[in-house]
Amino acid sequence: MLVRFAAPVLTFSVLASVSPAMKAAPCEGPEYRAFDFWIGEWDVHRPDGSLAGTNRIEKVYGGCALRETYAAAAAATAQGAASYRGESLNAYDAGRKVWHQTWVDNSGLLLLLDGGIEDGKMVLGGTTLAADGTVTRHRITWTPSADGTVRQHGESSEDGGASWVTRYDLTYRPRSPETP
C-alpha cells in the first residue's frame, strides 16, 4: 500500500518542479523591451545645453518594469538647490496592450500616462485635474537617436488637445563622471 501512494506523490513532485521551468519567462516579449532605449544613467540637458538634472532609468522586478529617478540640477531650481525630484514606474500592460507610466514628484504632481511606440518613438499621454477643476492633457514623447541620446518632449493642452504647448524639451546624454 505504501508503494502505491508513493509513486503518485513522486510523479506530482517531479511535475511541479519541472512545470515552472517549461514556462516562458515573464516580461520577455519584444513589447516589454520597447522602452529599453531609455535605460541608463543620464545627464539631462535643455535646448541651450545647460544641465537640467540627472536621471537614472533601471530595470526592476525581473525586467517587468522600468524605474526612473530624476533630480534637478542645482542651477535648475529657483532656490539654487537641487530640490525638485521625481520618480516614475513604467511597465507594459499586456492586458490592455499599452505602456503605462505613473509619475510622482515632490511638488505633489501625480501623472498617469498610457501609450506606446509610434514611428519608433515612445508616446505616452494622460490627463490631470487641478483643484480648481482645470483639466490638462499631457503628452510626452521619447525619441532615441543614433548617437545614443534620447529626446524627451513634454507638451500640455488645456483645450482638449486642439492646441499643444511645449512644457519642456530635453536631451538625455549618457552621464558624465564629472556630473555632481
Image (cartoon, rainbow, N blue to C red):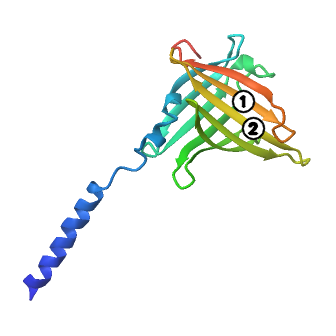
**Residue 42 appears in which quarter of the rendering?**
top right
State the image coordinates of residue 120 (x, y, percent, origin top left): 55, 29
* Position of 64 relative to 9 (above/below): above
Q: Nearer the viewer, residue 23 or 51?
A: 23
Residue at the far front in the pictured view: 119
- Please state the total of marks drawn on the protein image: 2
Quadrant of image for the N terminus: bottom left
Query: Do tag 2 and tag 1 residues touch (Cβ < 8 Å)?
Result: yes
State the image coordinates of residue 73 (x, y, percent, origin top left): 68, 20
Secondary element type, mark 1: strand
* Distance (Cα) linking label 2 and label 1: 7 Å
Secondary element type, mark 2: strand
At x 77%, y 22%, the residue is 77
Q: Which mark is residue 138?
A: 2
Left or right relative to 46: residue 54: left
- Tell me the kind of residue under disc 2: His
N-term-proximal mark, 2 vs 1: 2
* Position of 73 relative to 56 (above/below): above
At x 43%, y 40%, the residue is 30
At x 68%, y 10%, the residue is 49
The residue under label 1 is 154
* Position of 61 relative to 18 (above/below): above
Q: Label 1 crowding class (10 Å Cα cut-off): few <14, some 14-19, many 20+? A: many
State the image coordinates of residue 123 (x, y, percent, origin top left): 63, 35
State the image coordinates of residue 74 (x, y, percent, origin top left): 71, 19
Q: Nearer the viewer, residue 15 or 147?
A: 147
Q: Label 2 crowding class (10 Å Cα cut-off): few <14, some 14-19, many 20+? A: many
